[in-house]
Image (cartoon, rainbow, N blue to C red):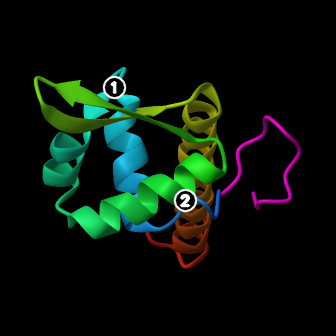
């Protein structure tokens, strides 16, 4: 379960493994699109941090950035691309696989020592 896994198989994705990137991607996975300020507030990051994360994720095709206006005020909206949604799903599956393997190993070790 590494980044070298076959396409479509669960793998830890280095691009979203950082907690801030993972929080942004997870937040956006629950909506079609969100305003920059809403994502910033929910993920509890600064404007500059969210801007850097969004630019990096956009650069690899996981996130789309749309700019426009509400009245005369500029606004920025963020959304996950299909590739971003798939990357998150595979990343979460890989984490769940790691946790399940560790639990099984812990249970087996416990059984070997005679504890139950």
Residue located at (75% from left, 57% from top): 1
Residue located at (50% from left, 56% from top): 55
Coordinates of residue 46 in the picture (x, y in percent): 20, 67
Coordinates of residue 61 in the picture (x, y in percent): 64, 42
Q: Nearer the viewer, residue 44 or 48?
A: 48
**Is residue 3 highlighted in magenta?**
yes
Query: Dot 1 lies on which element?
Result: loop
Q: Which residues are magenta?
A: 1-12
> Is residue 100 shown to the viewer in this render?
no
Q: Nearer the viewer, residue 94 or 47?
A: 47
Lateral position of residue 113 relative to residue 76, left or right: right
Query: Dot 2 lies on which element?
Result: helix
Coordinates of residue 80 in the picture (x, y in percent): 48, 33
Lateral position of residue 38 relative to residue 80, left or right: left
Lateral position of residue 20 relative to residue 108, left or right: left
Q: Main secondary structure of the magenta part?
A: loop
Location of the C terminus (image quadrant): bottom left
Q: Which image quarter: residue 111?
A: bottom right
First in sequence: mark 2 vs mark 1: 1
Q: Up-down: is 75 above or below 22?
A: above
Mark 1 sits on what residue? Answer: 33
Mark 2 sits on what residue? Answer: 56
Q: Up-down: is 115 above or below 40?
A: below
């Amino acid at each position: 379960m590494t980044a070298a896994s076959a396409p479509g198989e669960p793998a830890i994705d280095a691009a979203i493994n950082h907690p801030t990137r993972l929080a942004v991607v997870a937040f956006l996975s629950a909506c079609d699109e969100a305003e920059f300020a809403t994502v910033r507030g929910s993920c509890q990051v600064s404007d500059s941090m969210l801007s850097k994360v969004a630019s990096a994720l956009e650069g690899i095709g996981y996130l789309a950035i749309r700019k426009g206006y509400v009245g005369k005020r500029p606004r920025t909206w963020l959304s996950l691309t299909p590739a971003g949604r798939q990357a998150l799903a595979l990343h979460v599956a890989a984490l769940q696989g790691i946790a399940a393997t560790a639990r099984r190993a812990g249970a087996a070790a416990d059984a070997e020592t005679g504890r139950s």
